[in-house]
Image: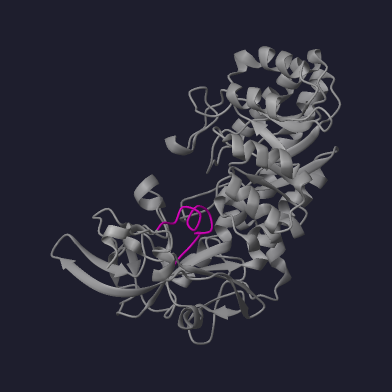
Amino acid sequence: MLSTHPAQLQNSGHQYLPLTDTSVKNLSPNQELLPLTAKVNSSDCLEIGGCDVTKLVEEFGSPLYILDEVTLRTACRQYREALARYYPGESLVLYASKAWSCLAVCAIAASEGLGIDVVSGGELYTALKSGVDADKIYFHGNNKSTAELEQGIESGCTIVVDNWLELRNLAELAQAAQPTRIAIRLTPGIECHTHEYIRTGHLDSKFGFDPNSLDEVFAFISQKPNLNCISLHAHIGSQIFESQPHKDLAGVLVDYLTKASHYDLSISELNVGGGLGIRYTESDDPPSIDTWVQGVCEAMVSACKRQQLPLPKLLCEPGRSLIGPTCVTAYTLGSRKVVPQIRTYVAVDGGMSDNPRPITYQSLYRVVVANRMSAPLTETLTIAGKHCESGDVLIKEATLPKTEPGDIFVIMSTGAYNYSMASNYNRLPRPAAVLVREGEAHLILQRETYQDVIRQDRLPKFLTP
């Protein structure tokens, strides 16, 4: 059962710190259930970034994504500062923007000194429009179109090559006068305990070159002066709590860097990807950002020393652990259905169209009733969405106060893969998003309208009324 009383949240680690409390910088956001600025105000309502969540819903409607700027900036700084502290060489943090790609989020990451990892032409376009320097953009993807490869070349970003088709296409498209920067993604053959759909490092994966083909890959690149291979990349998965797989990955990459050195390539970077997990429920216990970075850095230094190699530039690509804990989603409660001796359903005004992760990954979340944070816990409820799917259930068996239609439910840790995977299923408009800071809310994503939903529809003339 999932408990929601504020005291129980405090016991599980969250401290409801006021916005002005400088000790937030000492908390690792990925270990927290709520954003760092969350607190309960004198009206017994949840506040985030100095803004009363119930008043945000009154102003902007619901469902509503609420993004806390302090939490996002804190996570960015912890990654960047930990790399500077533990790694003697050069380093760069890349925000894996597939977790939430929009102008405001990319701009904040860039303002904190981060680069951006993109996986499509649309994400590349967003990063560039948000003001990110192309030198700090890395373009991933396992099936980039010719148009996307041309877009990447024109932008000047680094293209992460995933397979032979891309490599050969780039060799034809790139200009010798201005060689295209590329990185090679390889499958490291490292297993980790996470959901099958988000485990990418094992050999049976759609991503990356097979390690056995790397000699052939390096030999091919060495004959192409229009390709400037600067980096090796590997990623082992997502929502990972184990430390050892990422330490092992550092050693694997250094071994492949040694192999590349025989082909006179200018590889100067190693990218360990991302994957650090976050806390969705009390039982989740991920390592802190600082601990994760320290382990990776020490493993990289040790591996380079063992192979007698100079330290490469070290890159990492956090996504979920940067953006996931920064956001909550607010809903308005509607109908109730009691199934005697089985369960009680309550429905909110969103669901799988704004958060598809429960129905897709069986993901678990936590919830509070934002307008009565200290009310006694008296009900066990299953929180359903409003979509025409029996599986549209956000949380099963949540322990909550007595609820009424119009209550504001807040589901935590919804920054990663909620907006980015949102849809118009059942033709629901996608929600708005606000950035909160110092008691002010700034609209960063406007709520879609019904007109937006049908904007791309076309009626043939013979069907026109």
Q: Nearer the viewer, residue 20 or 9?
A: 20
Q: Nearer the viewer, residue 340 or 196?
A: 196
Residue 112 in percent (x, y) is at 76, 58
Residue sitting at the far bottom? 43
Identify the residue at image location x=56%, y=22%.
189
> Is residue 325 among what the camera can see?
yes
Q: Is residue 207 left or right of residue 357?
A: right
Magenta-colored segment: predominant secondary structure: loop
Residue 418: in magenta span: yes
> Is residue 96 among what the camera can see?
no
Rendered-image quadrant of the N terminus: bottom left
Rendered-image quadrant of the C terminus: bottom left
Residue 318 in percent (x, y) is at 64, 46
Above or below: residue 347 compared with residue 187: below
Residue 225 in percent (x, y) is at 80, 22
Residue 262 in percent (x, y) is at 80, 13
Place residue 87 in its image quadrant.
Answer: top right
Q: Nearer the viewer, residue 359 or 363?
A: 359
Above or below: residue 121 compared with residue 168: below
User: Magenta segment, which residues?
Assistant: 410-423
Place residue 403 in its image quadrant.
Answer: bottom left
Residue 199: in magenta span: no
Q: Is residue 162 left or right of residue 73?
A: left
Q: Is residue 143 left or right of residue 317?
A: left
Identify the residue at image location x=54%, y=33%.
143
Place residue 463 in its image quadrant.
Answer: bottom left
Q: Is residue 464 left or right of residue 74?
A: left
